[in-house]
């Protein structure tokens, strides 16, 4: 048994113990998303249009993350809608920024690894960079949408008669906490994954101008900014849609109760 398989088994057991049924569904969500990413890479390598692949797999990945991570259909539906709309908006931003940055492709650091190999595989590096950036932001956007939905769902359970304005106020309070934790997670994730590269930059005497114009650093920094912007847009948009959906559901339930009592 390899270390990877052992860790996957440990992860599955812990998620089952801690989360129960939801933990099992979340574990399968991780596996399905991993398989989807592998499938995306295979389809791109086979020469299928990258833009079409990206448009198809954005809703697939969001549906996998949100619907398997939330056990309330109304909340999952509103979370999916808000996350999908935010992803489309962020995708437009990514297209513009990637065109301005011109940072797609391989940097000089990959020279020794690619010695003897062709660096012109017949694929569009700019479109690959756009796809990587979009998929990198999906996790942060979906996580923020699910966090908002889970918090508002618990509030609704404990206070079934809560009004829409009260839900929006509660969502704003939850959103402030979600923003803080999500941004710290994204930033520390970047520094954690790029610590060795930063050390390499400093040991080789890179100037500040060389670092901020280096392809690897620029691509990673742009992805971090895209993710932060996506989270910033997701929190208020999810709060609005979720509060509206929950209040509408309350109104329907109240009408049903009145009709049944009559």
Image: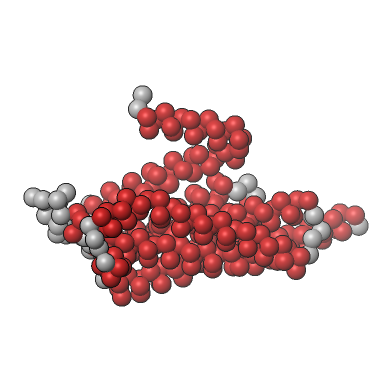
Q: In this view, does 147 lie above or below 207?
A: above
Query: Is any atom of residue 260 visible in this view?
Result: yes
**Viewer-nearest residue: 197 or 60:** 197
Q: Answer with left or right where residue 191 lies relative to residue 150.
A: left
Residue name at image x 43 percent, y 66 percent: 225
Residue name at image x 60 percent, y 40 percent: 22
**Looking at the image, what colour scheme do you see?**
secondary structure
**Viewer-nearest residue: 165 or 169:** 169
Quadrant of the rendering where the C terminus is positioned: bottom right
Q: Where is residue 65 in the image (x, y as percent from the top left)?
A: 51, 50
Residue name at image x 60 percent, y 35 percent: 18
Q: Position of residue 158 (x, y in %)?
A: 78, 51
Query: Is any atom of residue 145 visible in this view?
Result: no
Furthest residue in direction right, as rendered: 262
Q: Where is residue 37 in the image (x, y as percent from the top left)?
A: 36, 49
Residue name at image x 32 percent, y 65 percent: 218
Furthest residue in direction top, as rendered: 1
- Where is residue 98, by image quadrant? bottom left
Q: Answer with left or right where residue 118 lies relative to residue 79.
A: left
Q: Where is residue 226 in the image (x, y as percent from the top left)?
A: 43, 65
Quadrant of the rendering where the N terminus is positioned: top left
């Amino acid at each position: 048994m390899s270390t990877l398989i052992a860790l996957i088994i440990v992860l599955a057991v812990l998620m089952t113990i801690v989360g129960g049924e939801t933990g099992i569904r979340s574990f399968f969500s991780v596996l399905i998303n991993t398989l989807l990413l592998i499938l995306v890479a295979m389809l791109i390598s086979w020469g299928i249009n990258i833009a079409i692949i990206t448009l198809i797999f954005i809703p697939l990945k969001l549906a996998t993350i949100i619907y398997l991570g939330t056990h309330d259909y109304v909340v999952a539906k509103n979370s999916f809608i808000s996350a999908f709309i935010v992803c489309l908006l962020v995708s437009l931003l990514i297209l513009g920024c990637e065109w301005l940055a011109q940072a797609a492709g391989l940097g000089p650091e990959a020279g020794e690894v690619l010695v003897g190999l062709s660096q012109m595989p017949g694929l569009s590096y700019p479109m690959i960079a756009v796809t990587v950036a979009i998929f990198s932001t999906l996790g942060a956007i979906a996580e923020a949408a699910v966090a908002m939905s889970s918090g508002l769902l618990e509030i609704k359970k404990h206070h079934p008669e809560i009004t829409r304005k009260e839900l929006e106020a509660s969502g704003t309070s939850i959103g402030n906490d979600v923003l803080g934790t999500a941004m710290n997670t994204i930033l520390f994730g970047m520094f954690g994954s790029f610590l060795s590269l930063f050390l390499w930059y400093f040991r080789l005497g890179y100037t500040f101008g060389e670092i901020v114009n280096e392809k690897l650093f620029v691509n990673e920094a742009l992805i971090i900014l895209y993710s932060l912007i996506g989270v910033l847009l997701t929190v208020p948009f999810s709060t609005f849609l979720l509060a509206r959906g929950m209040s509408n559901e309350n109104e329907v339930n109240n009408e049903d109760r009145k009709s049944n009592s009559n």
